[in-house]
Amino acid sequence: MPLNLRHLAISKGFSPNDQHFDYCLLCLVFLPASARAGRQLAVTIDDLPVVTSIKSKGIHQSITRRLLGHIKNSQTPVIAFVNEKKLYSNGELNENAVELLRNWLRAGCDQGNQYRTV
């Protein structure tokens, strides 16, 4: 019986409407498969601290927690690139955004500076 990725992701608690649904499929299926095959894999993620149009501290924390959980479980090396502009709100450093970046570091992910657009 073929593997139905949509059902697998939903059974793991993901919604097909989740903005990161495709990335979750990657974590659930392809990362463990590459490890079993003896291959090495690294993942890059752009636009940290978080990519969403929803302006909610709770949503940002939830997205970050879920992504990092999958990264930790798969033991996949990750480098995440920070969009420095996203660290500021009304010209002031947003401590909530900085804390999201600290979570990535605590999870063992490397970080790089993507860019800062003015």
Image: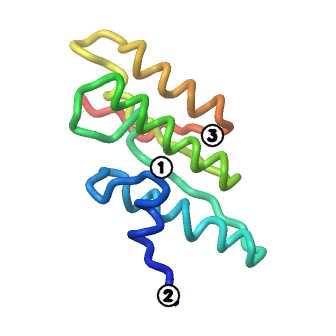
Q: With respect to residue 72, does 15 lie above or below?
A: below
The reply, left or right, for residue 25 in relation to residue 105 is left
**In 3D space, how far apart are the residues under numbered discs 1 and 3 (Cα atoms)?**
10 Å
Alpha carbon distance from label 3 to label 2: 36 Å
Instruction: State which mark lies toward you, 1 or 2.
Output: 2
Rendered position, 38 above or below 82: below
The numbered dot on residue 30 is none
Q: Position of residue 12 (x, y in %)?
A: 49, 56
Residue type beneath disc 1: Ile
Mark 1 element type: strand
Residue 35 image offset from top left, x and y in percent: 72, 69
Q: Residue at x 46, y 60 (%)?
A: 11
Q: Amino acid at mark 3?
A: Asp
Mark 3 or 2: the one toward you: 2
Check disc 2: other Cα within 10 Å, few if <14, some if 14-19, many if 20+: few
Q: CA distance from mark 1 to mark 2?
A: 29 Å
In front here: 40 or 112? 40
Quadrant assignment for the C terminus: top left
- Counting from the top left corner in percent of width and height, residue 82 is at 44, 36
Q: Residue at x 39, y 69 (%)?
A: 6
Residue closest to the far top: 92
How many numbered discs sit on the rendered protein? 3
Pointers 3 and 2 in contact (C-beta within 8 Å): no
The part of the image, by quadrant, that contains residue 63 is top left
Identify the residue position indicated by label 2 in the image: 2
Q: Which residue is mark 3?
A: 110
* Secondary structure under the numbered disc 2 in the rendered image: loop
> Do callouts 1 and 2 mark residues in contact (Cβ within 8 Å)?
no
For label 1, the residue is: 45
Mark 2 residue type: Pro
